[in-house]
Amino acid sequence: MKVLVAVKRVVDYNVKVRAKADGSDVDLNNVKMAINPFCEIAVEEAVRLKEAGIATEVIAVSVGDKSCQEQIRTSLALGADRGIQVETGGSVEPLVVAKLLKGVIDKEQPQLVILGKQSIDGDNNQTGQMLGALANMGQGTFASEVVVEDGHVNVTREIDGGLQTVRLTLPAIVTTDLRLNEPRYASLPNIMKAKKKQLDVYTPDDLGVAVTSHLTQVKVEPPAERKAGIKVADVDELVDKLKNEAKVIS
Amino acid sequence: MSTLVIAEHDNSTLKVSTLNTVAAAQAMGADIDILVAGANCGAVATAAAAVLGVGKVLVADNAAYEHQLAENISLLVAEVGAGYDNILAPATPNCKNFLPRVAALLDVAQISDITSVESADTFQRPIYAGNVIATVQSADAKKVITVRTTAYDAAPGEGGSATIESLDAVHDAGLSSFVREEVAVSDRPELTSASVVISGGRGMQNGENFKLLDGIADKLGAAIGASRAAVDAGFVPNDMQVGQTGKIVAPDLYIAVGISGAIQHLAGMKDSKVIVAINKDEDAPIFQVADYGLVADLFEALPELEAKL
Ligand SMILES: Cc1cc2nc3c(=O)[nH]c(=O)nc-3n(C[C@H](O)[C@H](O)[C@H](O)COP(=O)(O)OP(=O)(O)OC[C@H]3O[C@@H](n4cnc5c(N)ncnc54)[C@H](O)[C@@H]3O)c2cc1C
Ligand SMILES: Nc1ncnc2c1ncn2[C@@H]1O[C@H](COP(=O)(O)O)[C@@H](O)[C@H]1O
């Protein structure tokens, strides 16, 4: 069984991103970039399926300009077998990413496609679900457990109030949540080996997809600032402030 | 202009998040209908018909929709939504699950988590864990949108008299089936709509110690939340996670206990009206957003706070 994993290049999660002063965009100058944490979990899950003898090949795919090859190499160092970059000028909308991934699915015919539930830059939480609709596949989103049985996958999902398990016919889509696994670190020898693994580059044309834009970012701005608070000396002062100043308790 | 709001419910009760979404729909200034998709969900339809400002409630009552399987619900919403200018749903885990499928079926973008309607085609939404607010304009004729419920006060749930119409269409995609659910029932208010929330972090040390929050929550009528670290460590269930990738809350009072204040956590609670932080590290970043910070050992401060409330 082939497993396709979608990985996105995003700003490292430790970076506090700011809007540029002119509001035209966010300031990403000299900012550390990384693989989206949810995508890292997706790669780990695919590699574990291979180690368990369930997956035969793990393919990491990323949509973006050439710089996203860095995150594909990271995925290869974590254990993916080969990589695909779909070359786009810059970042594209989730619907377009989904269409491009559908194009890759048509070429590769994977049985399982694993994505992150959310990219931590755009906070969209859309691509996996959109891909499910376009490819007419079932989806197990926000996964905390993935169990592949013949012809099916059982996915346990993090939902409001607890957990839900659904059974999907293969091929299917999974999107990862934080509790699915704890990704490993790439070892130095594996990082070296990754440099030699196959990485193919496709254009949207190769996949028969037109890159369109439905949304325009008009401006970006910082969120409303909170006014500075105070430190209270003890519990008595805290209770007094909440009752008499903030008036949020009685 | 017309807007279809998708109801969030559990087949028996209509969730407040639906009312927040109706409020966002009102900000768009369109006629509003509500779609209730579920099984044996008549009571939900009745509740939806009472929401002020709603014209029509469409009910798709069928076993295929009982567990809100995205593959089935999305086909229904795409079909019904074809006749509307806007499709709005609350940004709950359930609606986030199926709505992007709807957008893809209709070949339009989805705009996630809007916090403001600037005009019929322009919206604001937080990106980068809420460190930036983006204004986005949509070129699509049909807008598919999830609404950040904390950004809108609930529309009145009473006083309306919408007509109720049943839909016969049954969509079963045959791609997925429900196996089981493990859902904890709690007497506490829902995290996302409670007026007081008290959350514990890694500093709580274990799940047993979360009991220290119970007495305080009882006295304040609070919901209990947690940081990712507390959930990952298995202290509490996943649905208690507050943050960028968990639940977004904005209560009148948020009390963070033993939580350092990582950006991902702040993303989920920094719009609360009053924030209290209890942490033994006076340099913890949580104090930068706290209106009232108490530098103290939580194991001493919590029992004292409970006693003095
Ligand atoms: C992709 C991604 C998504 C994430 N999403 C979320 C999210 O949605 N929500 C979220 O919360 N996090 C999220 N995180 C994790 C986040 O980055 C932090 O790791 C997490 O919030 C830390 O939790 P914490 O504050 O409980 O733990 P810590 O950072 O370890 O802080 C514990 C705090 O407790 C204090 N403490 C310890 N003992 C005591 C005591 N006896 N009395 C008083 N204080 C004490 C310490 O001083 C410390 O400040 C995400 C991370 C990633 C990478
Ligand atoms: N440019 C991209 N390249 C590859 N995968 C992507 C890209 N954008 C989104 N994805 C996948 O879709 C998931 C959800 O992203 P989003 O819908 O943007 O929140 C990510 O975790 C990735 O797995």
Image (tube, coloured by chain):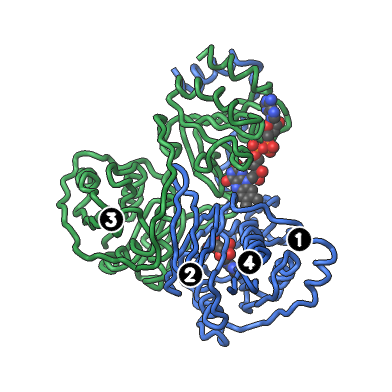
- Would you say B287 lies left or right of B91 here? right
**From the viewer's perspective, is the residue at label 2 or at label 3 nearer?**
2
- Would you say B75 lies left or right of A161 here? left
Q: Residue at x 41, y 50 (%)?
A: B180
Kind of residue sitting beneath label 4: Val
- Residue A7: numbered disc: 4
Kind of residue sitting beneath label 1: Asn
Q: Do labels 2 and 3 share a chain?
A: no
Q: The blue chain is which one?
A: A
Task: Quarter of the image for the N terminus of chain B: give it.
Answer: bottom left
Is the CB–ligand 2 distance for label 4 below 8 Å? yes
Label 4 CA crowd tier, 10 Å (few <14, some 14–19, many 20+): many
Kind of residue sitting beneath label 2: Gly
Q: Distance between the residues labelled 2 and 4?
A: 25 Å
- The chain identifier of the residue carrying mark 4 reads A
Q: Mark 3 points at which residue?
A: B37
Name which of mark 2 and mark 4 comes first in the sequence: 4
Name which of mark 2 and mark 1 comes first in the sequence: 1
Badge 4 element: loop
